[in-house]
């Protein structure tokens, strides 16, 4: 059975619905049924989201400045040479498509490059290249702006280049990756796991290899990248990587026309 948890298990507060149920039983015994109906109506209108289930990262993320895409367009001019005019990625330069990626994840990665949490390894020549670019941005507002601009661009479809076995990859994806990256590799913000299905397979392959060899994810403050190292290690050989990426690629939707 597929199982895609919405959030990590947490110490739960008494569930609001249970409290409501007990109150309802008590009230229906003591007062008339009309009162209970009114109460039911009221509780249905009140927000039922259990606040304790929202991870702190998401709360922080909401606080990220909205970003100004007009300003961001100016910033993006320094990215065009590698990521392309429409943030569609340029394989010859090994720079991935950015346009299909989640806003919060783009922001976090740019901040990670700036802080040296990503691109720290001597062996990570491409990550280092990108870190220089991210550090050249003025401040976190410039980061928000450029992300806001990227998210105004139209999504693109990315071509499969690795030719793995989609069926085998699907099995591996569902048993190892789906619980965090969500069904169809659409990403799951509550798990801080990004959407993967709009990224270039050659780029994803490099990231998996980098996680496996601790070129990425091993920085002491990279709590999200650290989660990926044991997961990448579960893909034991190159074929397993190609298979899972073939499946992820197969779930990507064609770009909007
Ligand atoms: C000199 C070429 C170059 C330039 C210029 C450049 N990048 Fe990159 N960027 C790369 C490469 C190469 C990677 C892949 C790094 C890796 O494999 O870890 C990358 C990765 C990224 C990532 C990580 C994507 C992910 O899915 O994790 C983001 C975000 C990004 N670039 C944004 C930008 C922005 C915004 C700019 C402009 C301010 C920019 N880049 C300018 C080459 C460049
Ligand atoms: C325990 C949760 C979890 C599982 C399971 C998991 N991931 Fe991840 N993955 C993450 C998180 C969190 C990140 C974001 C890391 C960061 O912020 O740098 C991530 C990032 C990635 C990235 C980098 C994306 C980019 O744009 O650079 C790739 C590739 C990836 N995961 C592939 C996989 C694959 C393939 C599997 C299954 C073999 C898998 N993940 C299983 C949590 C998970």
Image: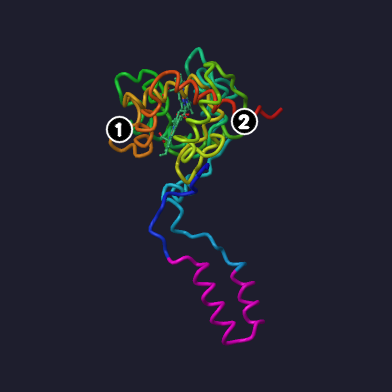
**Residue 42 among magenta residues:** yes
Give the CA separation, mark 2 to mark 1. Answer: 32 Å
Residue 53 placed where, x, y %?
45, 55
Task: Say which residue appears at 41% left-offset and 23% top-offset.
Answer: 130
- Side of 237 relative to 80 (left or right): left
Image quadrant containing the C terminus: top right
Magenta stretch, residue numbers: 14-43
> How are the residues colored?
rainbow
Residue 48 placed where, x, y %?
55, 63
Task: Say which residue appears at 42% left-offset and 21% top-offset.
Answer: 206
Q: Nearer the viewer, residue 115 or 250?
A: 250
- Side of 146 relative to 55 (left or right): right
Above or below residue 36? Residue 105 is: above
Q: Are marks 2 and 1 in contact (CB under 8 Å)?
A: no
Residue labelled with disc 1? 219
**Residue 66 among magenta residues:** no
Q: Residue furthest right?
A: 257
Label 2 element class: loop
Residue labelled with disc 2? 153
Residue 239 placed where, x, y %?
45, 18
Q: Quadrant of residue 45?
A: bottom right
């Amino acid at each position: 059975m597929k199982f895609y948890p919405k959030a990590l298990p947490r110490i739960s507060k008494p569930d609001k619905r249970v409290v409501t149920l007990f109150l309802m039983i008590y009230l229906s015994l003591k007062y008339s049924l009309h009162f209970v109906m009114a109460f039911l109506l009221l509780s249905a209108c009140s927000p039922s989201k259990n606040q304790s289930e929202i991870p702190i990262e998401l709360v922080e993320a909401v606080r990220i400045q909205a970003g100004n895409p007009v300003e961001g367009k100016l910033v993006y001019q320094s990215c065009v040479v590698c990521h392309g005019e429409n943030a569609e990625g340029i394989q010859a330069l090994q720079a991935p498509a950015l346009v299909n990626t989640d806003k919060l994840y783009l922001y976090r990665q740019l901040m990670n490059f700036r802080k040296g949490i990503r691109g720290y390894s001597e062996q990570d020549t491409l990550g280092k290249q990108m870190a220089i670019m991210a550090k050249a941005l003025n401040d976190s507002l410039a980061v928000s702006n450029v992300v806001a601009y990227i998210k105004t661009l139209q999504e693109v479809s990315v071509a499969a280049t690795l030719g793995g076995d989609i069926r085998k990859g699907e099995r591996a994806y569902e048993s190892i990756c789906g619980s965090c990256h969500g069904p169809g590799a659409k990403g799951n913000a509550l798990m801080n796991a990004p959407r993967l299905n709009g990224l270039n397979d050659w780029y994803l392959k490099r990231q998996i290899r980098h996680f496996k060899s601790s070129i990425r994810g091993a920085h002491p403050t990279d709590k999200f990248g650290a989660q990926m190292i044991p997961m990448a290690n579960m893909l034991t050989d190159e074929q397993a990587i190609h298979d899972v990426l073939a499946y992820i690629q197969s779930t990507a939707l064609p770009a909007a026309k």
